[in-house]
Image: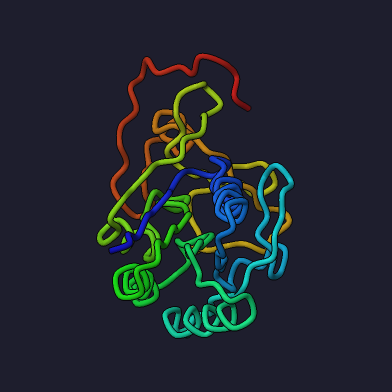
Amino acid sequence: MAKLFFRYGAMNSGKSTAMLQTAYNYEERGHNVVLAKPAIDTKGDLGILSRIGVTRESDFLIAAQTDVYGTFQRVRAAIRRDIGRDVACFLLDEAQFLDEAQVDDLLRIAILENIPVIAFGIRTDFQTVAFPGSRRLLEIAHDLEELKTICRCGEKAEFNARKIDGIFIFEGEQMAIDDDHLTYEPLCALCYLSESQGVLNAGRRQWPMAASFEPDSDFS
């Protein structure tokens, strides 16, 4: 039986790069792969974009009501008809934007069709709250792996801080993509709490920061 894998990490941890490298590895050995991403990720239209500039077109987009299992089966059937070989792996970018039923479809593909499914995504939003798709993947995936990146202080980054015009903000909608003024910065827990004045999630209680806390360097 194949497995459902979830590869997660903070922003700039190389998730899309790792996905495209995985696709290359399969195809270099003569295997077919299917690539998909949520339609809400409008960067590059159908393209899957990596931070280092590598791009590739996905085989299909997953909209809010997309039947992932059925769509995958149709794409798979077309590949088998046109190429004469079955699909060896299903790769999915930005998996945090899926809903719970769509993540369940990923598990069905792995178990019922015996095809490995590798989903890549972010675990939590800019308020440290899990995305619905990521939460479900953490619940049902057979295999979890954190893809690591570094905070500005040199420690491992865990959280994704949101900026508008370079200023950190900690309130707003969970999903915000098409905004030229908006950026994200991966931070470790200590640097995140320093910028948020001890708040992990807007609306929840504030953690008192130690009076003696001073960043090691000027992060502005």
Percent x, y of residue 196: 45, 39
Image: 24 above or below 133: above
Where the N terminus falls, by quadrant?
bottom left
Depth check, front residue: 59 or 76? 76
Q: Position of residue 197 (x, y in %)?
A: 42, 35
The picture quadrant where one finds residue 106 is bottom left
Coloration mode: rainbow
**Position in image of residue 63 (x %, y %):** 54, 79
Q: Going 46% across and 35% down the picture, which residue do you hit?
A: 148
Tell me: residue 155, above or below residue 33: above
User: Who's the residue at 41% across and 34% down the image?
Assistant: 193
Query: Up-down: is 73 above or below 2?
Result: below
Which residue is at the front of the view, 58 or 14?
Answer: 58
Name which residue lies at 62% across and 42% down: 167
Q: Position of residue 34 (x, y in %)?
A: 55, 68
Query: Quick one: quadrant of the C terminus?
Result: top right
Q: Nearer the viewer, residue 118 or 80?
A: 80
Name the image quarter holding residue 56: bottom right
- Left or right? Give the position of 151 relative to 177: left
Q: Name the residue furthest front.
A: 84
- Numbered label tally: 0
Residue lying furthest left: 139
